[in-house]
Amino acid sequence: EAGVAQSPRYKIIEKRQSVAFWCNPISGHATLYWYQQILGQGPKLLIQFQNNGVVDDSQLPKDRFSAERLKGVDSTLKIQPAKLEDSAVYLCASSLVGGLADTQYFGPGTRLTVL
Amino acid sequence: GIQVEQSPPDLILQEGANSTLRCNFSDSVNNLQWFHQNPWGQLINLFYIPSGTKQNGRLSATTVATERYSLLYISSSQTTDSGVYFCAVEHQGEDKLVFGAGTILRVKS
């Protein structure tokens, strides 16, 4: 079974530029998550999708971040314009149905550096 | 929101030693999970353990929900155990995992 795929693995941009990350979850997984992990901290949930609907985006900075999951499969996360404090690893995870006991499987992450 | 505190922040072990990692949380939870993030950044789920005790090989975990803490035991540590161990909880009434800051473990050969 293929795992969660993410691209690119690394990205360096200057502040005020735009950037997009892509995630392809495990086949058949209904729930998809985007996390932000700043160096030295645990991951923080940005947005959770159930199929192609948003379940939770309460911690997504909506003035600059956007995410979509068209057709309920892969997803893109966009930052426009980027700030220095957006430097972090962006992790995508998926789970079969979501919910309390459902295991989340994480991708390798995209490391973003904003100069 | 709920607070999740992990201790110690940093731990260095000689290969073969045992260790205990602790996770304290500030309120009642529906869900508690332990994760391992390897030195290459890959995050792997170790245990789903909202209460009780579970074991998987050299790893075991215990959660005492009434006292709001969980422990992760690593026995006979190996260099491949190195990385960051995270505790994550799901606060009652919310549907998302909140992660602690992690414990950095280094196992020396």
Image: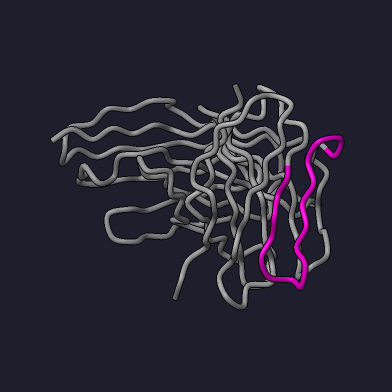
Q: Give the x, y percent position of residue B2.
A: 72, 36
* Position of B5 relative to B83 (above/below): above
Residue extent of the magenta highlight: A62-78
Q: Give the x, y percent position of residue A65.
A: 78, 40
Could you tell whether B82 is left or right of B32 in the image? left
* Position of A57 relative to A13 (above/below): below
> Farthest residue toward the left?
B109
Q: How many marks?
A: 0
Q: Is residue B75 visible?
A: yes
Query: What residue is shown at x 67% (from left), y 55% (from top)?
Result: A33
Could you tell whether A86 is left or right of A105 in the image? right
Q: Can residue B100 be seen in this view?
A: no
**Quadrant in the picture for the N terminus of chain A:** bottom left
Task: Identify the coloring.
Answer: one colour
**Quadrant in the picture for the C terminus of chain A:** top right
Picture quarter containing residue A100?
bottom right
Query: What residue is shown at x 37% (from left), y 44% (from top)?
Result: B38
Could you tell whether B109 is left or right of A34 in the image? left
Q: Give the x, y percent position of residue B69.
A: 55, 40
Q: Nearer the viewer, residue B71 or B104?
A: B104
Q: Nearer the viewer, residue A56 or A1?
A: A1
Q: Is residue A70 magenta?
A: yes
Query: What residue is shown at x 55% (from left), y 47% (from top)?
Result: B64
Q: Give the x, y percent position of residue A96.
A: 62, 72
Query: What residue is shown at x 46% (from left), y 36% (from top)?
Result: B22
* Position of A86 relative to A34 (above/below): above
Q: Does the magenta stretch include residue A6?
A: no
